[in-house]
Image (cartoon, rainbow, N blue to C red):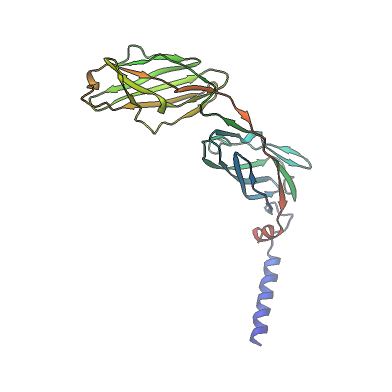
């Protein structure tokens, strides 16, 4: 009798859950999907929490860069493809969907389309256009003359990149210089302040690296800018920086590069009965 009562309770609970399901006609009803992981020589792309309501489709995308190149994903070029039409996601200042991934790095973003009431479907496809690779070594180094500290002038150019000195400080223990560079070229610019160095004008054979590792390489589109600070520490036996003339040597700090498209296969969003049932309770 006790076993029968227990089974009856379980059946009633199951039935109550079924009856508690959000109806398909409810605007908040969600269709959930399973999406297979994509893996190429360069990338691993995983998809999580893919689902649609009547007003939108959304999916979380995790991208791992397996290559030694930068990867640029222009999410706005991807397309959600439905029987009734194609839609491209739009990012915001808070959630940017056009972004770079460093070599061997990873990033997670949310792709979402809205603006209609026909997204509550059981089948759709995501076309992943907008993936590009960028060689960190670039295609062409933009040369610039050594920059003197204390400054004899406040600006200089490296090809199509125009830079200005915003502030500087020289003490015995540390020298720092903050620059602002604006790029007006046609290709991309990889600006890597870790590549620059400094030398003492009176003893140019002694070269010292930029010790500021917080400001890393930045990829800049035409019309963009980047502010960075260089920091130097020279032993007192070599020179007292407070009273020395220094030359900043740019080396390969400014490098132009091209974006090479990467072809990524489209993925199908396959209706997941079990997850849809679970998420609509």
The residue furthest left is: 237
Q: Residue at x 39, y 22 (%)?
A: 179
Residue 50 image point, x, y percent? 65, 49
Residue 23 screen position, x and y as percent? 72, 58
In the rendered image, which quarter is residue 4 located in?
bottom right
Q: Quadrant of the C terminus?
A: bottom right
Q: Position of residue 256 (x, y in %)?
A: 53, 21
Furthest-bottom residue in this view: 1
Front-lying residue, 26 or 151 = 151
Residue at 56% over, 29% down: 134
Camera-side residue: 12 or 195?
195
Nearer to us in this view, 195 or 58? 195
Answer with left or right where residue 91 lies relative to residue 148.
right
| In this view, 133 is above or below 43 | above
Please name the residue shown 79% across and 42% down the image.
83
Q: Position of residue 209 (x, y in %)?
A: 35, 27
Where's the N terminus, which quadrant? Answer: bottom right
């Amino acid at each position: 009798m006790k076993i029968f009562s227990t089974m009856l309770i379980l059946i009633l609970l199951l039935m109550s859950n079924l009856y508690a399901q959000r109806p398909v006609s409810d605007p908040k009803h969600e269709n959930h999907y399973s999406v297979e992981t994509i893996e190429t020589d360069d990338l691993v792309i995983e998809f999580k929490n893919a689902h649609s309501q009547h007003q939108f489709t959304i999916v979380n995308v995790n991208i791992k860069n397996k290559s030694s190149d930068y990867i640029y994903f222009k999410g706005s070029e991807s397309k959600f493809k439905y029987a009734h039409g194609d839609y491209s996601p739009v990012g915001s200042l808070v959630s940017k969907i056009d972004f770079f991934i460093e070599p061997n790095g990873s990033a997670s973003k949310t792709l979402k389309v809205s603006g209609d009431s026909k997204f509550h479907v059981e089948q759709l496809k995501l076309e992943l256009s907008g993936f590009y690779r960028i060689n960190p070594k670039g295609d062409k180094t933009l040369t610039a003359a050594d920059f003197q500290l204390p400054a004899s002038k406040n600006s200089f150019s490296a090809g199509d990149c125009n830079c200005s000195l915003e502030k500087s400080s020289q003490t015995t223990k540390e020298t720092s210089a903050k620059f602002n560079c604006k790029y007006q070229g046609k290709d991309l610019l990889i600006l890597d302040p870790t590549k620059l160095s400094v030398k003492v004008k009176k003893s140019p054979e002694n070269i010292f690296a930029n010790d500021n590792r917080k400001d890393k390489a930045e990829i800049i589109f035409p019309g963009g800018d980047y502010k960075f600070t260089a920091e130097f520490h020279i032993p007192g036996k070599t020179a007292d920086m407070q009273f020395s003339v220094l030359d900043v040597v740019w080396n390969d700090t400014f490098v132009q590069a091209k974006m090479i498209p990467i072809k990524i296969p489209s993925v199908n969003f396959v209706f997941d009965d079990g997850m849809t049932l679970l998420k609509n309770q």
